[in-house]
Amino acid sequence: MALSMRPLFAVLALLVSGSTLAAPAVIFDMGGKFDKSFNESGYRGVEKWKAETGKNYLEFEISNETQRVQALRRMAERGASPIISIGFAQASALEQVAKEFPKIQFAIIDGVVNLPNVASITFKEHEGSYLVGVAAALKSKSGKVGFVGGMDIPLIRKFQCGYEQGVKATNPKAEVLANMTGTTATAWNDPTRGAELAKAQFAKGVDVVFAAAGGTGNGVYQAAKDAGKLAIGVDSNQNHLQPGTMLTSMLKRVDVAVYGVLKDFKPGVRALGLKEEGVAPAMDEHNAKLIDAALKAKLDAARADIVAGKIKVNDAMADPAACKK
């Protein structure tokens, strides 16, 4: 029987069976732990911790929004600690349950909950996006590059702002065409619309497009392959999805965040950027022919300058006005 069809309390009872009460727990959000993106990166982090320590952990995969509070509460009732929620969408549920269980440690990945028993891990997406913007500008032959966002929220504007800064710093004459997929949660899983937006940008001369749009990005990557253009993935390493088309992927190292919480829980807010290896362009065998030594050297130089403070990348969430044209 599918996991989502079982009563939640029964599923959790099965997951807890045979485990120690002090075991940590991970709550994967909708999309499942093998979503080839955000959740799966978190899964790799907890599996690394498990391999190193030999200890077990509890887990649950959310299949609808109503399960969030109940899943967190059930884990807390069984003494799991820390309890890690993957994704900003779980912030409200985690805040509610963390107040009910002040002696339990909680963590939210990619969100902020200001409570004394909660570790909030965020990312400096603008820094990683700056670097893929540099790559896009260097690889573009037309001088026109694109951006396709998912849901139009401040977080995605943060990606866009960093990307545009990297492009403009590399080629001040370059043009960036940007579109958001929508204003509701469906914008994260609409590959058909993603392909339409990418094709419209290609028709206007764009030859490299960066998608920060969840599952919608799959349509962008397919459209880029069909048109003989280049695309940039996001969150997890998506270079393998369309080899030869994927210039790189802007990694958000959720695995690093989860592993860090399990190794050394510290309440409060922590942001992971280039210096902390929380974000980075993905390099592997799938894009080795697209990222030559000269391009890589320029990316390394830009990274070093950002880490050293020589380049300041504007954060659209902290200062929206700084990113407006």
Image (cartoon, helix red, strand yellow):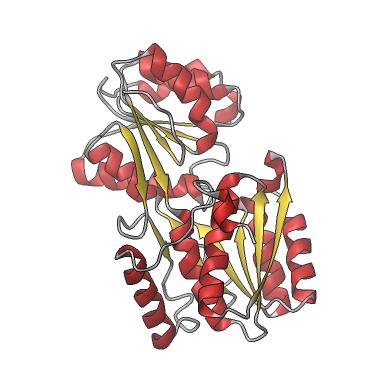
Image quadrant where one finds the N terminus = top right
Residue at image location 58% in from the left, 28% down from the top:
4
Q: Residue furthest left?
A: 53
Rendering coords of residue 192 (x, y %):
76, 57
Query: In the visual, does 71 lie left or right of 270?
Result: right
Residue at image location 39% in from the left, 67% down from the top:
311
Query: In the visual, does 271 lie left or right of 133?
Result: left
Task: Say above or below: 306 vs 288.
Answer: above
Instruction: Please tell me which residue lies in front, 139 or 5.
Output: 139
Rendering coords of residue 187 (x, y %):
70, 47
How many numbered circles are shown?
0
**Residue 167 figure quarter:** bottom right
**Residue 222 figure quarter:** bottom right
Task: Say above or below: 92 vs 301.
Answer: above
Task: Say above or below: 49 vs 201.
Answer: above
Task: Say above or below: 290 vs 249.
Answer: below
Query: In the visual, does 308 lie left or right of 129?
Result: left
